[in-house]
Amino acid sequence: MVVWAAWIPAIGSYMVESSNEPFNPKVGAIRFDSRSPKDIDFRKVKEGSSGGTIVAASQLLEESTIRLQEFLSVDSLANLAIVHGNDGTWHAHGDPTEIAIQVFAHRFTWSRRTMVGQTAEWKELAELPFDREVKRMSDIMQQNSTGQKWVFTKGAVERIIGACTGMSLTSSSISSRN
């Protein structure tokens, strides 16, 4: 399983070119398209004839707003899969969906292994594992530099949207759902 497209509202769509190494985040160029998925012909993207511009992950991070970084943080921190490379060979352990999401985050050098720990940016306080009735899971983290506690959640779209109090319709502000 591979994440080959991700959309962040008000920013755009990120698409990963095909690779025969699903665990290797260094293989497969990233394309960026500022359009919404409804405006993209994904058949042409898969053929390589359309779908935005190839851009280095470092450049995408440099030119992005905080929204991409927040998205990648949720990808990594609400995720228990492990992806690691040794001597050019990549390995993964965990649920196939979580591995695919973790590989996508690794493309941007967002790695849970380097982000979580006593001396890292985040400390894990608790995990609320996936529940089939609730259809979501969460990790409660503390940002070591500020002491502030955060909840990183992922799950079924309808359950996540239902739990949100607002959404980002622009690259910098959050609108209330009320």
Image: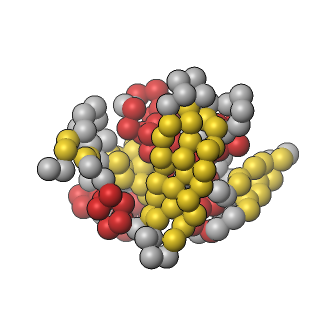
Image quarter for residue 147?
top right
Residue at coordinates 49% horizontally, 76% vertically from top-left? 132
Single out the residue that lies furthest toward the left: 178
Image quarter for residue 110?
top right
Single out the residue that lies furthest toward the top: 145
Single out the residue that lies furthest toward the bottom: 133
Q: Position of residue 144 (x, y in %)?
A: 60, 28
Residue 67 appears in view: yes
Render colour scheme = secondary structure
Q: Position of residue 160 (x, y in %)?
A: 36, 60
Q: Position of residue 149 (x, y in %)?
A: 50, 37
Residue 3 appears in view: no
Image quarter for residue 1?
bottom right
The answer to whether residue 51 is left or right of residue 175 is right
Residue at coordinates 24% horizontally, 61% vertically from top-left? 38
Q: Position of residue 15 (x, y in %)?
A: 44, 53
Q: Nearer the viewer, residue 104 or 77?
A: 77
Vertical placement of residue 84 versus 150, above or below: below
How many numbered markers are drawn? Answer: 0
Residue at coordinates 46% horizontally, 65% vertically from top-left? 136
Residue at coordinates 23% horizontally, 58% vertically from top-left? 39
Q: Nearer the viewer, residue 17 or 75?
A: 75
